[in-house]
Image (spheres, rainbow, N blue to C red):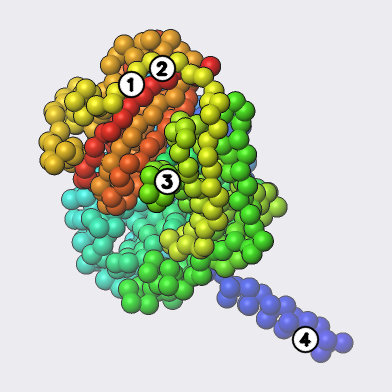
Amino acid sequence: MKSLILLVILLLAFFASSRAAERPPMRIGLFSDTHWTENPKSFQKTEAALKVFKQEKVDAIWHMGDISDLLYVKAYRHYRQTVFPSFFPENPPDELFVYANHDLLRRDALGGVEQMPAAEAFETVRKELGVPNAPDDERIVNGYPVLIFSQFTANAVKEKKLEETANKYPDKTIFVLDHCPADHTRSPYSKYPQVIHIYGHNHAPLRDENSIWQGTHTEVSAGCLHNWRGYLVGKSPESKENTDFAVMDVYPEKIIYRRFSVVTGKECKEPWIIPLPFDAKTAPYRRDFRKANTPAPTFAADAALKLTVDQPFSAVKLTWPEAMQGGEVYKYYIAVEQQDADGVFHPITRLDAYSEFHLDPHLRTGTFSQAFSCGYFDSGRKYRFSVTPAGFFGQTGTPMTVDFTPPANMKESVLIFESRNPMEELEVKQIIGQKRPTAQKPLTLKDGFYQHPSGYVRIFLPEKAWKDMEGGKFRFTIDLDTRQEAPTWTMVLNNPVPFANANNRIKMPEGENIGWRYVIECRKMRAPTDVYSVLLREGGPGEFRINYVKLEKLP
């Protein structure tokens, strides 16, 4: 009997020691972009993440910024006084927070938003939320140096702090908490291979395999607990729920980065395993390595692209099934080509669409569709649609195609403004320093193309055109030739004061794209005060030529 008891004790000790051995020296709960409001329902995803953090017994919780949607004092208090204590009434994990742009915004007198001075706003956040760290700070967590930078910290400050930390801890992984993903070509972190840079801001799901990058160092997203749109060539993406957050297990020889869903409370995809110390030659999440070793997604042999047309003709819709074979689908490239007099097809636009990769499997439909406004088409011409499945790293499968001749019975609209010579008739200006047109200068013309230096450029329509709109739904059409490389611009119809968009941003394509058409259909936001202009923003330098512009009022 004594021998049996001793055996049981030894077995229990063995299993206990095995479980202890599985426990990493440091376990961190990670999330970002919670965008709380004063409504307690806005905390539901945060609460689901905290529940997992409690079950996982994390040592610390790190938040990558955009804590509240605006500077809502009640939201910070609700989290600190009610939400967090309900999961961790005693012995709570340590917390670190990144300070970002949404937490210094507040409503202005016109109903828009204005930016408060960072020092004043962040002091309010720190006081009301009980944040332990300053906007720029350094902590030692379980022996690892952790640098925290606000969204507005200058690169020179980061570089100096990184150099000091790397000299002080030459053999240690350095965790950098920052709101924005770094520009890989100009990153202050690129000199330090030991850096693990954790960020938020772009709202990309952790199920997006581009949410981890390795090159000179490692960049990885903390996920997002708000909605996300992303950027799609040719159209404004629809808002989608984002449900992803992470638990990071740190071992001396590796990091296991586990991705979770607030819907199920379970891991939603296989973990990313980051070997330590970092070696650029063998880093498993280099984009070139992953592209070369990940098959392209493909459609099944019996898959078909279906086409339906509204009557009277206002739009044509394509429908297709998920590409189930090969690698995982990230996007579908949906292109339109127009046939010329010689029978040759030339591209005129592309409207990309995301797959359902961001959803838990039981929520996916497996069917996709894309509508094209009649504004893309000219009567009497022949067109060809193609849908191409693309993986996370740009690898593409074989497209499906279908030809289309638009019907003549187009739904009527009211022509408000038209310019067949926009390079002469429309004003185009670079906006200096601000999003609002307070300081402007003309763009340089070279060989018939405007030279876009990067930043903000506006194409102005006559104010009378927008005032004649008198509210309601409208269609804006612009034909552009563009030459640009990544990062490319985004296009939006924008009212400068108050700063408000008619549509979400449309990503422009890379390379040379001649004869492309962009069609935006939406509702005038605050008629008659909104006077929109075309804002080509973000991205790098490039050039463009305007061939045609039209504004129509829709029934």
User: Left or right: where does residue 119 sit relative to residue 258?
Assistant: left
Earlier in the chain: of badge 2 and badge 3, it is 3
Q: Nearer the viewer, mark 4 or mark 2?
A: 2
Amino acid residing under circle 3: Gln
Question: Could you say whether the residue bearing mark 3 is in a helix, strand or loop?
Answer: strand
x and y percentages locating residue 36 in the rendered image: 51, 34
Q: Quadrant of residue 211?
A: bottom left
Q: Which residue is mark 1?
A: 418
Q: Is residue 321 left or right of residue 534?
A: right
From the image, which quarter does the N terminus lie in? Answer: bottom right
Query: In the picture, residue 279 is in which quadrant?
Result: bottom left
Q: Which mark is residue 339?
A: 3
Point out the tag, 3 or 4, that comes first from the N-terminus.
4
Residue beneath disc 2: 415
Q: Are marks 3 and 4 in contact (CB under 8 Å)?
A: no
Tell me the kind of residue under disc 1.
Answer: Glu
Q: Residue at x 56, y 29 (%)?
A: 313
Q: Give the residue at x 60% y 61%.
A: 299
State the image coordinates of residue 524 (x, y, percent, origin top left): 44, 18
Residue bearing mark 4: 7
> Which residue occupies 21% across, 50% down?
155
Give the mark toward the camera: 2 or 3. 3
N-terminal-most mark, 3 or 1: 3
Q: Residue furthest right?
A: 1
